[in-house]
Amino acid sequence: MFSDLFETPGYGARGSSEVMDRRRYSAAVTVALALIPWLVVPGAFVVADTAEPAPEAADQDDEARLMLARGRKLVSEGRPADALPFFEHAIDMAEARLPAIAPGRGILAHELGTVYAAAGQDEKAEAQFQRALKEIERSLGAEHPELLGPLGDLASLVGRAGRYREAEALFGRMVELLTLSRSPGAPEVTAARVQLAGVIEFQGRTEEARQLYLQAVEAADREGRESTALAAALGNLGALHSRLGQPAEAEAWLARTLDLRRRLLGPRHWLTALTAKDLGVVQEQQGRIVEALGSTATAAAALGNRCGVSGSDPPPYVADLCSDLAVLRRRLERATPTRGAPAPPTTDVAGGHWTQLAARDSAAGAREEIRALGLRFPALLGALPSRVERVDLGDRGTWHRVQYGGFTTRAEAVVLCEALAAAGWGDCFVPRPETAP
């Protein structure tokens, strides 16, 4: 399964490379559309500089523009099949007026191919992408960046069809073209390397793929270039190590992926959810059930109401992720050491990092709160140490803080708060010294 050139989502720890087919009008196509205004395309609708176009020609130009505009609008509405007649008519009119050798022919063929692909007509799409490459190369040369669009779309298309050797050659050519005009750590180069590594991994050449992912990460790190493409490379490395039975190595890569995706995509993005779920898988593999539960709750928070909502129709990759996440959470809850009634607070536990969930004005009230929280969130809190911390705040009185944790790092404590927030308890934070209730 493959995606477009500039974005590489996927299903890491589940068993495939982090690339997938979403059957959508791709980001690469959107970039291509911006390059196709009629009078910008070299050779399109060419007239002498000093001549006024004939009225009939001007009418044809207007009709072609109108047809194309209607087609693009339908595509933007998710109706590529309805858009095809408009595109085909507009492009037939345009090509009738183009010179025999003109880059505009290739650009138009690429655009038509993207609409065929979005409509699920892969054979016609492939023919147009092949034609686009031929026309652009003939008019602009074999190293022109205009080749990148049809190269990427053709590579994705043949990869979806399982023709990995062909996809490998196309993605390899993309990497070569991109490095002629961009630095090794540029996001576009990183994305192309990730795609190339993905098709190599699909062919069972795991170590070769791992080295390509590492090259992409190292080049981006040297230049300080953070991007979604870098996150894809990191996530794929984590997934690869997970499949090789190396959960500790996988966790290191996935933890970095999660941090990057949170910052670049936001905490609610489905790729953030995917990474948190994959992180939970490798934590489970290492027997760290509570942390794994925290990671799955983070994933659930990222997905929000996209899982299990009546009448909802999430995209296939989100539906698959919701299903995988539900299976993982049930498995983790069965493995949670403490079941049934929650353990009483252990007031003498010291050290580590703690989360604070509440504060009460009596020790009895704090202990009752621990009992209630344990019953409400047994999967998250049942196996954790708890304590009541007494604090004298002078004029504000004496308070008893309800705390869970004893985590090794502050980050782990933060994960628990995020998990509780996802489960419906928002009053959780990691206290600092002298923090009031």
Image: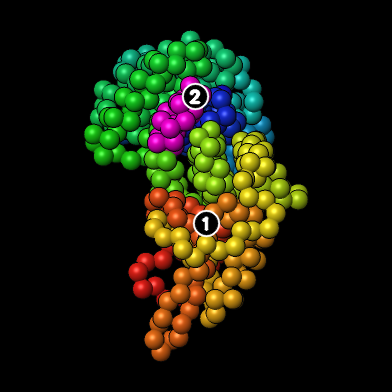
Crowding at mark 2 (Cα within 10 Å: few <14, some 14-19, many 20+)? few
Q: Is residue 194 above or below residue 333?
A: above
Could you tell me how many numbered marks the image carries?
2
Identify which residue is drawn at 65% across, 66% down: 372
Q: Is residue 174 above or below residue 395?
A: above
Mark seen at residue 310: none
Q: Is residue 378 left or right of residue 295?
A: right
Which one is nearer the viewer's eye here, 413 or 4? Answer: 413
Expressed as whole percent of the image width and height from the top left, the position of residue 188 reads 36, 31
Identify which residue is drawn at 31% across, 24% down: 215
Q: Which range is magenta?
A: 235-254
Quarter of the N terminus within the rendering: top right
Q: Which residue is mark 1?
A: 385
Amino acid type, mark 1: Pro
Q: Secondary structure at mark 2?
A: loop
Q: Which residue is mark 2?
A: 245
Numbered disc in front, either 1 or 2:
1
